[in-house]
Image (cartoon, rainbow, N blue to C red):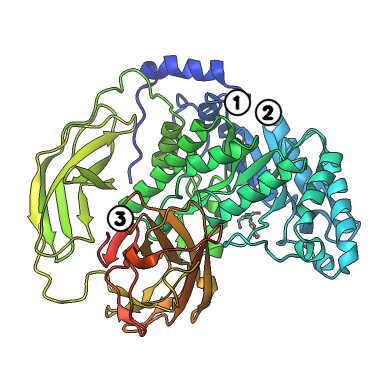
Amino acid sequence: MPLAPRPPARSRRRSITTFFATALMAASVAVALPGASASAADPTLQQVAASKGKFFGSASEVSSLNEAPYAAILGTEFGQITPANSMKWENTERNQGQFTYSGGQSIVDFAQSHSQTVRGHTLVWHNQLPGWVSQLPASQVRPAMENHIANVAGHFAGDIYAWDVVNEAFNDDGTFRSSPFYNAMGKDYIAYALRAARAADPNAKLYINDYNIDGMGAKSDAMYNLARDLKAAGVPLDGIGIQGHLAVQYGFPYQMQQNFQRFADLGLDVAVTELDVRMQTPSTTQKLATQADYYRQVAAACAAVTRCVGITVWDFTDKYSWVPGTFGGEGLACPWDDQLRPKTQVIDAIRTGFGYDSGPGDTDPPTVPTGLRATGTTSSSVSLAWTASTDDTAVTGYDVYRGGTRVGTASGTTYTDTGLAASTTYSYTVRARDAAGNVSDPSAAAGATTQAGGGEPPAGGLKVQYKTNDTSATDNAVRMTLQLVNTGSEARSLTGVEVRYWFSDQASSYTTWCDWAQLGCGNFTHSVVANGSTAGADHYLRLTATGGNLAPGAATGEIQLRLHKADWSNFNESDDYSKGTATSFTDAPKIGVYVGGQLIWGTAP
Ligand code: 9MR
């Protein structure tokens, strides 16, 4: 898609001067870069972040530093570097007692010559760990771990602003992950590692780092409890690393800013350490708009929390992203593409998230969209089209409203609203947005009536079936067995499919379990999401598929789920919206199925 032009340099000069004046971390002046077409007048991401007292960094492979166009961007746009692999155990102590620092040293040298800080990553992790560690007798794991930390953190002492001392200590349900360290020492290994790191490098900030703790949920609750306990015990812990590996198909993490704030309120720093936002390829204008919006929201969450110290992207270019090699069919996750061209939509969104004011001359909203019309309906969807707006800089997207509520965004001039009721009339309006966040007045409304249902399966080709395996509606567990069924005529991937089981309760913290699934519990993640104050549905259990395929007519088989309150007190399930009584699999229209945030099965409360 075309890159949005920036306002002329002349009209932006004052705010850019302000950026230079307020930058807290030194960064080179932007120059014309091979492969980077961002205007020289634009502030770099580091400058924008620094205007809020934060840094903006990137992970980097040591081999990439030799690539001049890559190095030019890395050295200019960013204020911080994390070695993607070169400080990991397998690269620093492949054989016991033999240490190698050359890769990490190259990153440090590059960073120092570009006035950048370095995040050390990572000292204690179950992954990229040489085999000899897991073969040690239990009694030798602690001395080996402490020796590794003493040497690696000791070697780089003074050159590292923060260490990811312990990485990925938790399973997704909040239990501790089995690892050579946990298996030998129990959870105390975390305190031992932090103390060893403090001794080796007294001035580095010491972090625990993990993924899927971006928003509130069982896993971030577990991290919160651990951090609180470590602080109470006087263990040297300075911050929580929130990796931030997001995906447009899974929705934005729940209450990210509040999650950052609760760690900050423990007296800890927070850093977004590995941000990327992937999507299933190929891209669409909708996916790209969602991706940019997620980047914006992360920057805004960090900007809003004083102790959020900065954001690091997990490499800045799709050329070196880990995503395609790990998630088949997914990619495009980084702010620069695989040709090292900046994705203006993403980069502008990050700037907007940090509150960058694009300057005088850009306070005019786009023109009001005209010609809004329904171009098609089904029993559950309405397709809309309108005539493009114009703007003094560029229109960056449109917000679509149904009955006054924003239901979606579009980068182009079409949108399909799904998950609607049959034979129902809806009223729509559309507003246009520009890069500075100016929004037009709403368009004239357009009405559309969905077609009659006729008893056909709902659009989307998936349904959920339920059977209860709950022996009591008043005990301390809510249990259900679900299965997804492909009602379409084509095979489909389950990746990104989300099921919502709505229930009512006032607890603030829950633990969820997948007890058994025919496809394997590893193909699903689960958590509890707060859902306002709707009677019978103020929370829902969210089940998300991360893999698996269904042939036409095929079903996943049983997915046995269970949830408890954090304090293990009893539920009263009698008014739970999604609870059923069937004891063999039955269609469950009060349980929702969502794809890309759109309801494709069931009726939401
Ligand atoms: O980007 C890293 C990739 O090159 C490695 O192959 C991979 C091995 O697990 O690790 C990647 O980085 C990970 C980071 O160290 C910890 N969080 C998840 C990152 C992506 O997998």
Where in the figure is residue 138, as x and y percent of width and height? 86, 67
Q: Residue 198, relative to residue 589: is it above or below?
A: above
Residue closer to the observer: 386 or 339: 386
Which amino acid lies under the numbered mark 2 shown in the image of this protein?
Ser
Under mark 3, the amino acid is Ala
User: Disc 3 to disc 1, how far (Cα)?
Assistant: 55 Å
In this view, 184 is above or below 87: below
Q: Quadrant of residue 358?
A: top left
Q: In the rendered view, would you say 139 is above or below 29?
A: below
How many neighbours does mark 1 have within 10 angstroms: few (below 14), some (14-19), or many (20 or more)? Answer: some
* Badge nearest the viewer, 3 or 1: 3
| Residue 535 numbered mark, or none | 3
Residue shown at 27% from the left, 78% from the top: 488
Q: Secondary structure at mark 2?
A: loop
Left or right of 11? Residue 174 is right
Q: Is residue 2 visible?
A: yes
Horizontal and vertical percent for residue 205? 73, 37
The quarter holding residue 93 reads bottom right
In the displayed structure, does residue 146 sit left or right of residue 521?
right
Compute the Cα span from label 3 to label 2. Answer: 55 Å
Left or right, 238 with reference to 260:
right
Crowdedness of circle 2 by 10 Å Cα count: few (<14), some, many (20+)?
some
Contact (CB < 8 A) between labels 3 and 2? no
Residue 284 percent location from the top left of the image: 33, 55
Under circle 1, the secondary element is loop
- Front residue (pair 495, 434): 495
Compared to residue 147, the image places residue 155 above or below, namely above
